[in-house]
Image (spheres, rainbow, N blue to C red):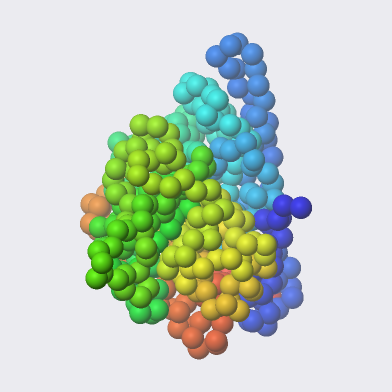
């Protein structure tokens, strides 16, 4: 039976609640989404036939501020997944100290089979259905899986038409031309880099001797691979939905030996891999590499593993086969609670998604602030502010981890849940 994402999210919350000795009344509130919206979106297709798509928006908690979270277009979108993602957004925003609650949206659709015009109609239809429940002071959507800045521009435009005035702050992740934030395109990866660098120093890893495998070569994964290579890390394997690659083996001279801890594989030429994927649609088949599956990539003997695709890829079944010393969760919910237990027993350090991939929502927060005040910062200022927030958050969470002798995930949840719980108690007089 496939893992239930919302059940996993609830387990993670309950683990933190036990550690905090959280009041049962507050826990009951935090275990349940505030609002669940399900809508039907009719779209007149290019053929003239009308298709109706099912869409969701889960508004989980707004004790700290307006709901915030992405919208994904994916054929496997389901309510359990959207509820889980909205919960994780709640804890993510709280973990890094943003004045946001958590929300998430999704549409059940294979957008690769739609024309550009049909995707625009679907995007505008989603906003028409959700318009009364979102807004700069209520709920601020953003891009997610298979949505992008152009889709955000259509959504912002549709909301502005409904309201009768320009409202750029209704969504983030927009193109620069319509109020987007400089640096937003690579901010999730950049935040992950800052977190990885901090964790690597704690674990005394030398970048030039550190090998990395990345599952998921979309926007976040490809940017992260490129930045890591520039920093001297050895990215030896990457994958996307169509398959993965691992670099060719190193050749040794008669007197040469690989240093202890070094990979027997060369680093990939990531810029060439990115170019190859743009031309062919996948990393699979890149010259002078060995083809591997996504599952095989997870089990490679590397120092750092970065799941950057979908949730529930490291489970109770394959956790014992993970060889990496450090896992950076660039995806949302890639490690199940059962897998967490096994990994922790084996000493594998997992930097949780609610910290590791928070770079995107941090720069989205900057975008929202800039939209509201109509005053815009340059890229250096945005990225500089991102670095300060995420590194300070890492330090706070790592201190909690060491102080209580707990995992990084439990420490991050303890910090986040305590902030939301205090806000709930103060607002409700509990």
**Measured from the top left, where is residue 284 in percent x and y?**
44, 40
**Location of residue 180 in the rendering, given as x and y in whole percent from the top left corner:** 34, 43
Is residue 51 placed above or below 209 in the rendered structure? above
Q: Quadrant of residue 388?
A: bottom left
Q: Residue furthest bottom?
A: 403
Is residue 60 found left or right of 95 in the rendered image?
right
Residue located 45% across and 31% down the image:
154
Q: Residue at x 47, y 77 (%)?
A: 397
In the image shown, does 428 or 51 lie closer to the viewer?
Answer: 51
Residue drawn at 47 percent across, 65 percent down: 301
Q: Nearer the viewer, residue 323 or 183?
A: 323
Residue 158 seen in this snapshot? yes
Q: Residue furthest front?
A: 254
Taking the spot 25% from the left edge, 64% from the top edge, the residue there is 253
Above or below 149: residue 289: below
Is residue 15 rendered to the left or right of residue 229? right
Is any part of residue 34 visible from this angle?
A: no
x and y percentages locating residue 14 in the rendered image:
69, 72
Quarter of the image for residue 106 reads: top right
The one of 178 and 151 positioned closer to us in this rendering? 151
């Amino acid at each position: 039976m496939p893992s239930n994402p919302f059940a996993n999210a609830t387990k993670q919350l309950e683990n933190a609640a036990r550690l905090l000795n959280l009041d049962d009344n507050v826990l009951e509130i935090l275990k349940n989404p505030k609002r669940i919206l399900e809508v039907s979106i009719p779209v007149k297709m290019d053929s003239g036939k009308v298709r109706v798509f099912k869409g969701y928006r889960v508004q989980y908690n707004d004790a700290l501020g307006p709901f915030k979270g992405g919208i994904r277009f994916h054929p496997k979108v389901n309510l359990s997944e959207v509820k889980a993602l909205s919960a994780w957004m709640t804890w993510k925003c709280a973990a890094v100290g943003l004045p946001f609650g958590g929300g998430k949206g999704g549409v059940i659709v294979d957008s690769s089979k739609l024309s550009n015009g049909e995707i625009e109609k679907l995007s505008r239809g989603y906003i028409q259905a959700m318009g009364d429940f979102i807004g700069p002071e209520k709920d601020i959507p953003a891009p997610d899986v298979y949505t992008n800045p152009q889709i955000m521009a259509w959504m912002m435009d549709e909301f502005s038409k409904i309201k009768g005035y320009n409202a750029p702050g209704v969504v983030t992740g927009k193109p620069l031309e319509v109020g987007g934030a400089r640096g937003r395109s690579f901010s999730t990866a950049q935040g992950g880099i800052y977190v990885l660098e901090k964790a690597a120093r704690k674990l005394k890893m030398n970048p030039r001797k550190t090998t990395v495998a990345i599952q998921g070569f979309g926007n976040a994964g490809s940017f992260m691979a490129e930045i890591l290579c520039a920093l001297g890390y050895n990215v030896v394997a990457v994958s996307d939905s169509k398959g993965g690659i691992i670099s060719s083996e190193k050749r040794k001279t008669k007197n040469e030996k690989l240093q202890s801890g070094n990979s027997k594989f060369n680093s990939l030429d990531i810029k060439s891999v990115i170019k190859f994927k743009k031309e062919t649609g996948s990393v699979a088949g890149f010259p002078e590499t060995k083809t591997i599956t996504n599952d095989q990539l997870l089990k490679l003997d590397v120092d750092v593993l970065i799941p950057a695709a979908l949730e529930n890829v490291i489970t109770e079944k394959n956790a014992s086969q993970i060889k990496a010393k450090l896992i950076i969760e660039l995806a949302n919910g890639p490690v199940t609670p059962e897998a967490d237990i096994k990994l922790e027993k084996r000493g594998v350090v997992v930097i949780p998604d609610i910290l590791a991939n928070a770079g995107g929502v941090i720069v989205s927060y900057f975008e929202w602030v800039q939209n509201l005040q109509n005053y815009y910062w340059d890229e250096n200022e945005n990225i500089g502010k991102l670095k300060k927030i995420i590194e300070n958050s890492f330090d706070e969470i790592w201190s909690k981890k060491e102080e209580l002798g707990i995992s990084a995930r439990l420490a991050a949840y303890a910090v986040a849940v305590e902030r939301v719980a205090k806000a709930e108690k103060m607002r409700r007089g509990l």
